Amino acid sequence: MTVSIQCSKIDVKNWYQEITLTIANEGSGTVDMNHASISFTGCGYQDPWGNFGGTLKGDLPLTLRSHTQGALDINEIVINHSNALPLAPGERGTLSFSFAAVQLPVKISDFTLTLASGSACQGQIMLKFPAMATSTTLKPTVDLRFPDARIQRYVGEWGQTLSIGDLSPGTYGISAPELCDNALRIVPQQADFSLVLTTGDEVQTCSIAYLPPIPLASICLNLDDDDFVGAKRVVELWSEAGLCEQTLTVGANQMLWVTQLLADHDYAICLQPTVINNQSLRSSAQPAVFTPVAGRTTIVEVAFQQAAVESRDFVVVNVTVLGLPPGTAPQRYRLCSGQYQYVFTLNSDAQQQTLPMRLMPGQYTLEVADITVDGTLWHCDQSAPVRLWQSINHMTLEFVPGR
């Protein structure tokens, strides 16, 4: 191992000064700086009450020693850390301390670094992965937690052994995450392991076992509804076990791709109740049931039942649209308040318009897409909630260029 030390510039006329050592690993393997000893000669000593710092200071107090050898003062600093303190190949670390001189001009030289016994980081962890009979693009993956709490991800191959080297002594945590794509889910039999390397050249082996792969399938949800284009519905997928597996938002007259469903298992589709343009929509009396099949995408229709709500006491709303250039095409808008939502199209001129339906009194959020006209982006400046009551029944929607 080749480790070099460089000392910061010394002020030869200063009795007391801060010194920073830069330590570089110029070798090809990681070294453990824990318990490393740095010695040097100088006309003085390191001040135990001074300032100490740097990336290699460690989280425990430094050990300071000094003695006289003939006309020379020999100083020693030992780095102490609660676990390994690795310095990777090509990496640099620093250690700073206060130096009190006993004579001028100040002289400091002959820096020597001695690593602790077995501190060369040549330990290995061998991860064995089982063969995979099912064809898949998924690869076995582990997250390795180092003694200094760093976490690094490693990817192996099925039926092979992954070797992780240049490791220092200490306790390592291994986590094997669940693997999943649109075709398979592969779950480890045991997700977390702990290994201890007691020496700098120890080799430990860990076998990662997995449960049989679970085949997955995909569907396309289709919500065929020409009356409420621009509205959104919330759809729930319930499993055979009576659990809501997924909650999805689907737009009217849109298809939504749903992946990672259990193949050959039954699912029921339930529509969360909502009111759109004063029409109450909810699931059919008998929710649709479908069974996804691996390797095939099934189109599943979202069925619902519809009934009008009593709206005679709702609010007649007038709207003025401002700011858009003349000739801008009509735009679609959406107002939402709890279960209620209203979708409508408005002309883009400044003439007052009356919405085609009454609105339930309340506080609404407004959704409208940005508009590009002749290369300029226009944005509806309506960040505050819209309040609509019998006494407040007018909305002004102003568009501004840019965002």
Image: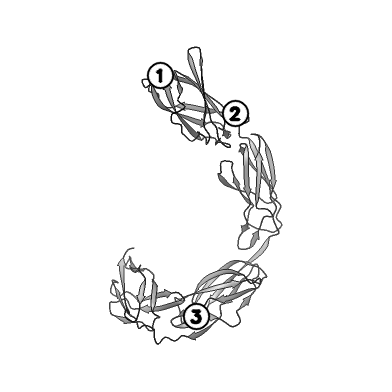
- Helix, strand or loop at mark 3: loop
On screen, residue 326 versus residue 23, left or right, reads: left
- Dot 1 amino acid type: Val
In this view, 142 is above or below 259:
above
Residue picked out by circle 1 = 106
For mark 2, what is the residue?
116
On the image, which quarter does residue 245 sit in? Answer: bottom right
- Give the label on residue 225, or none: 3
Residue 50 against residue 194 in the figure, above or below: above
Type of amino acid under label 3: Asp
Marks 1 and 2 sit apart, C-alpha to C-alpha, by 30 Å
Q: Position of residue 324 (x, y in %)?
A: 30, 72
Q: Secondary structure at mark 2?
A: loop
Q: First in sequence, mark 1 or 2: give its number.
A: 1
Q: Residue at x 43, y 24 (%)?
A: 99
Residue 290 located left or right of residue 402: right
Mark 3 or mark 1, earlier in chain: 1
Residue type, label 2: Ala
Task: Give the CA distance from mark 3 to mark 2.
Answer: 74 Å
Residue 57: image location, x then y, percent? 50, 33
For label 2, the crowd category at 10 Å Cα-Cα, with few meaning under 14, some 14 to 19 and many 20 or more, is some
The residue lying at 51 percent from left, 81 percent from top is 281
Element at label 1:
loop
Drawn side of residue 160 relative to residue 93, left or right = right
x%, y% of residue 163?
Answer: 65, 42
What crowding class fits label 1: few (fewer than 14 Cα within 10 Å), some (14-19), or many (20 or more)?
Answer: some
